Image (spheres, grey):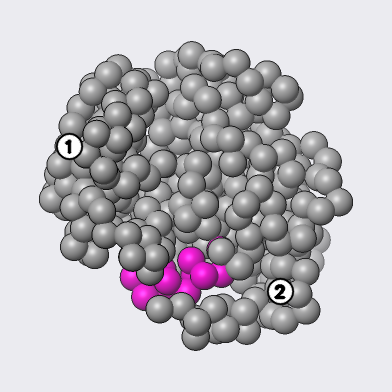
Amino acid sequence: MPSPDNAVDGDVGGVTVADVLAAQARLRRFLPATPVHHAERFGTWLKLENLQRTGSYKVRGALNALLAGRERGDTRPVICASAGNHAQGVAWSAYRLNVSAITVMPHGAPANKIAGVGHWGATVRQHGESYDEAYAFARELAQQHGYRFLSAFDDPDVIAGQGTVGIELAAHSPEAVIVPIGGGGLASGVALALKSQGVRIIGAQVEGVDSMARALRGDTQPLAPAASLADGVRVKVPGLLTRRLCAALLDDVVIVREAELRETVVRLALEENLIAEGAGALALAAGRRVASRRKFAVISGGNIDAAVLARLLTDIRPRPPRKPRRRRADTPRPAAPAASVAAVSASPSTLLTAIAAVEETTP
């Protein structure tokens, strides 16, 4: 999936690298950087967004959108539609900033995610049997009552906030980064942050839940998503803004089978002692098809229902991983150089200098 010549000029699809840097300056006061972990049996480094506030990367975009709105003088109550993680991110962010929030979630949304939204004081409305039905209802309420509607992915402030995952990864000198795709907000933001450094950005989707991959091939018809463990990426139509960004910046999209995804969730729990939801393990499941000596998979969330995890651990017997090859040299492999984080735009200034400059001008 080749990128056009201007794909790394810092301004693609209405969102710029400067927007991501501004988001980093805002969020660092609220959200500490999440750790990375080397999953040796998978041969992949993991960016642990399952350890993020609210258990998912989604809080980055939600918080950045509310902070940016406040800078613009927008104090309206906020409303969103979500299968769970975006709703929790909005609820936590609204609680921290003392903003009224309403979340519309479909019937059948995981009970732990509904409880998480309520814990932070947001109003929960359940409507419809799918994300798309909840989305239409939330838009209707926003229009009727003058609320600010906050998309889970197709919003410049949300995309910029998700892109801060990429800024944190830049410090670890990745060669390739694998990102799960639902609506495309995380993939768009991470690609914006890292593409100019020559990092390959690969999206991951599930068979039958691959509306973005189809859209990038020119098939923009709404897709009725198949049932999947990855409920967080079951999107019928990807965003218009994220579609343009992904078309310009992604190197490839890997389609994962449902059985591979389920096995990956179990292996993460048993071999790495890490809990991930279906969508959260999607990038790692795709990683086996990505050739790279230093690849990172974003573990995007850990909010899996306890009963679902128990069934998976009971039913799935993963194949044993291949035995490691014995290295000829006894000396350990040197670690990657500590990051002087390279600039992510065409500007010659370094990323850290750019962040400092943005912080000085950010209210």
The residue labelled by disc 1 is 124
Q: Which mark is residue 342?
A: 2
Image quarter for residue 312? top left
Q: Nearer the viewer, residue 191 or 314?
A: 191
| Magenta run includes residue 28 | yes
Q: Position of residue 229 (x, y in %)?
A: 41, 25
| Magenta run includes residue 154 | no
Badge 2 amino acid: Ala
- Image marks 1 and 2: residues in contact by CB distance under 8 Å: no
Element assignment for label 2: loop
Q: Is residue 73 above or below residue 206?
A: below
Q: Which mark is residue 251?
A: none
Name the residue located 71 percent from the left edge and 61 percent from the top edge. Answer: 10
Q: Nearer the viewer, residue 17 or 180?
A: 17
Name the residue located 18 percent from the left edge and 32 percent from the top edge. Answer: 125
Badge 1 amino acid: Val
The part of the chain drawn in magenta is: 20-32
Q: Mark 2: few, some, or many residues within 10 Å (few <14, many ≥20)?
A: some
Name the residue located 62 percent from the left edge and 84 percent from the top edge. Answer: 353
Q: Is residue 296 above or below residue 73?
A: above
How far apart are the two marked residues, 1 and 2, measured between alpha carbons? 42 Å
Element assignment for label 1: strand
